[in-house]
Image (cartoon, grey):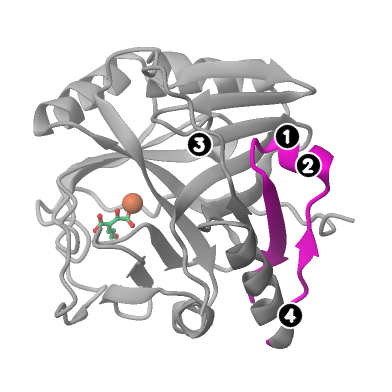
Amino acid sequence: MITLHDIAYVRSGTADAKAAAAFAVDVVGMELVAQEDGVTYLRADKRHHCLAFEEGEAGVLASAFSLKGPDELEAAEKELQAAGVEVARGTPKQARSRRVEDFIAFDDPFGNRVELVHGQVQLARPVHFGRPAGITEFGHICFDAPDVKEAYAFWSAHFNIKVSDWIGDWACLMRFDPVHHKLAVFRGSEPGLCHINFQVDSLDDVMRNWRFLQAKGVEIEMGPGRHPQSTAIFVYFKGPEGLTYEYSYGVRNLGDDWVPRVFDPTEPDAIDMWHGPIQRTQTQPQLRRPLPA
Ligand SMILES: O=C/C=C/C(C(=O)O)=C(/O)C(=O)O
Ligand SMILES: [Fe+2]
């Protein structure tokens, strides 16, 4: 069993790094940490970065989770290989570019590129936020996959992942610590990054951010609303090149005795208890690249 410790980062390709970074800083409120070798690094909490834009074709390149250390990384590599998953270890140069000690990469059964890392660099200094959006941390990652049941079968077979809630066969919200979900999979015809979530400090932050986004003419995909699953109050909005961001406040923590629930996706309040207009958040496509050599 591979024990995920935390989410680490999303790495996304961009054809316009300047626009992608400007949106991440001036609209989302992240800190621009560095721009180096065609990569722009953005942070929102203690991590060196939780979002990196690599110049090139637009689309998600990888989503990463951290493990405890080198022994755990090696054990993860062996476990995945034994299960027939093709796994590659990153080169020192690639690890340096990700600001991690070491990492492995593989594709989930649908082609979502996942990286497992250890030794992600942290920055001790406070985050110099681009604007006061109230971000407290990088909250969760959401993939698309054509079969969410099969996606859960994969994650629960090899990882310390438990389902927290199902939305029929349309979505699976998963946890590996008390937080309701740090990984979600939504049904979509192709692999991709459904959205990247940032937790904010208060309900007021969600509402202030919503007003700010509206005033800036940013496309609001959904919200403000409240998810019945995590009870979080949310707003989803669209950044450049199809990258969807979510702010949310109030995600619940679960105990070991939690029994997963099943919500009917055809019900009007299945994803928003406030019955706001439901719009399927468009996904940033997964770019198909060879595994690290
Ligand atoms: O569509 C349902 C979304 C649920 C949640 C939640 O319960 O917080 C999400 O954050 C999500 O996956 O976007
Ligand atoms: Fe979310």
Q: Label 1, label 3: how many angstroms apart (C-alpha)?
A: 13 Å
Give the spatial CA distance, label 2 vs label 1: 5 Å
Q: Is label 4 in contact with label 2 (beta carbons under 8 Å)? A: no
Give the labeled residue for mark 1. Answer: 97
- Residue 250 marker: none
Question: Which residue is label 3 attached to?
Answer: 50
Q: Is residue 174 visible?
A: yes
Tell me the CA gap for discs 3 and 2.
Answer: 16 Å
Q: Secondary structure at mark 3?
A: loop
Nearer the viewer's eye, disc 3 or disc 2?
Answer: 2
Out of 155 and 248, give the one closest to the viewer. Answer: 155
Q: Are marks 2 and 1 in contact (CB under 8 Å)?
A: yes
Q: Quadrant of the C terminus?
A: bottom right
Q: Is residue 249 above or below residue 15?
A: below
Residue type (three-letter) at the residue carrying disc 4: Gln
> Which amino acid type is shown beneath numbered disc 3?
Cys
Kind of residue sitting beneath label 2 = Gln
As helix, strand or loop, the secondary structure at mark 1 comes to: helix
Question: Which residue range is magenta in the image?
Answer: 83-111
Whole-angstrom CA distance, mark 4 to mark 1, is 25 Å
Q: Is residue 156 magenta?
A: no
Camera-nearest residue between 26 and 140: 140
Q: Does the segment drawn in magenta span residue 98?
A: yes
Say which label, 4 or 1, has the lower sequence index: 4
Does the Cβ of the disc 1 residue fall within 8 Å of ligand 2? no
Q: Is residue 224 left or right of residue 104?
A: left
Helix or strand or loop: what does disc 4 sit on? helix
| x, y percent for residue 256 | 19, 76
Q: Which residue is mark 4?
A: 81
**Residue at 25% across, 58% down:** 179
